[in-house]
Image (cartoon, grey):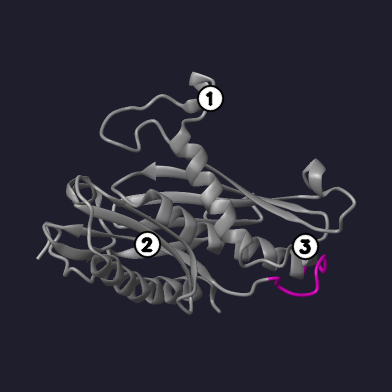
Amino acid sequence: MRNSGRRPDELRPISFEVGFAKHAEGSCLTKFGDTHVLCTASLEEKVPPFLRNKGMGWITAEYGMLPRSTHLRVDREAARGKQSGRTQEIQRLIGRALRSVVDLSVLGERQITIDCDVLQADGGTRTAAISGAYVALYRALQTLVEKEKIEKLPLSHQVAAVSCGIVEGVPMLDLDYIEDSSAQADANFVLTNDGGIIEVQTTAEGAPFEEKALQDMMTLARLGIKEITALQREALGI
């Protein structure tokens, strides 16, 4: 039994509140336990210079943690004048994950920017951000269909993400901060609703781990993704 009382294969309470931000084309307040991330999707009738006159759209993402999302206040990165390497890595991951399931040619020359702002952090902020970003993106794409700017949703799969780790020798699903900070190995799995792999990030903390541990974490991740994508569909009413 974990500190939270969860089983090793049990997710934290997860919710997706669609339409949280009034003015965005798509938005979702995502909660993975005490990790809360606001995801908004904004539509622009333009694309980056490298895609001009190619008839294709683009999806990009930005990620940030609010100053009191953690126990201590962290400075806004804008005040420091640059983004951290962690921030850049996470927002690129979110963008890659979403683009992998979207037919960008259907979008036309439009860009959708996903903003993921961490309101409160207790581990798994990137996985919560990706899962919520998909919901916000879906709503933005629905808006385009409703306004007859595109004929159909250009989505091939759902996308969600979840963390796993080896804590005191036990594979565990959806780590909170305490578990993540003491794990012997931790991993982030970005998968489709049918278990297809988009990206896996895994790291040993202190000593190498066996291949079986990775397989055990993958098994847990697929179980978790099945639950998360069901919650996404419920929130979207699909």
**Left or right: 3, with 38 as reference point:** left
Residue 127: image location, x then y, percent: 41, 56
Q: Quadrant of the C terminus?
A: bottom right
Instruction: Indicate which disc residue 162 carries.
Output: 2
Which stretch is magenta?
146-154
Residue 223 is drawn in which quadrant? Answer: bottom left
Task: Indicate whether 125 appears above or below 198.
Answer: above
Residue extending furthest right? 53
The answer to whether residue 19 is seen in the rendering is no
Q: What kind of residue is marked 3?
A: Leu
Residue at position x 19%, y 52% in the image: 184
Determine the secondary structure under disc 1.
loop
Residue located beneath label 3 in the image: 107
Instruction: Indicate which disc residue 180 carries.
Output: none
Residue 182: image location, x then y, percent: 17, 47
Is residue 149 located in the magenta-colored stretch of the structure? yes
- Labels in figure, total: 3
Residue at position x 54%, y 76% in the image: 237
Q: Residues within 10 Å of mark 3 (few under 14, many from 20)?
A: many
Residue 56 is drawn in which quadrant? Answer: bottom right
Q: Nearer the viewer, residue 107 or 232?
A: 107
Residue 100 is drawn in which quadrant? Answer: bottom right
Residue located beneath label 1 in the image: 82
Residue 117: image location, x then y, percent: 48, 43
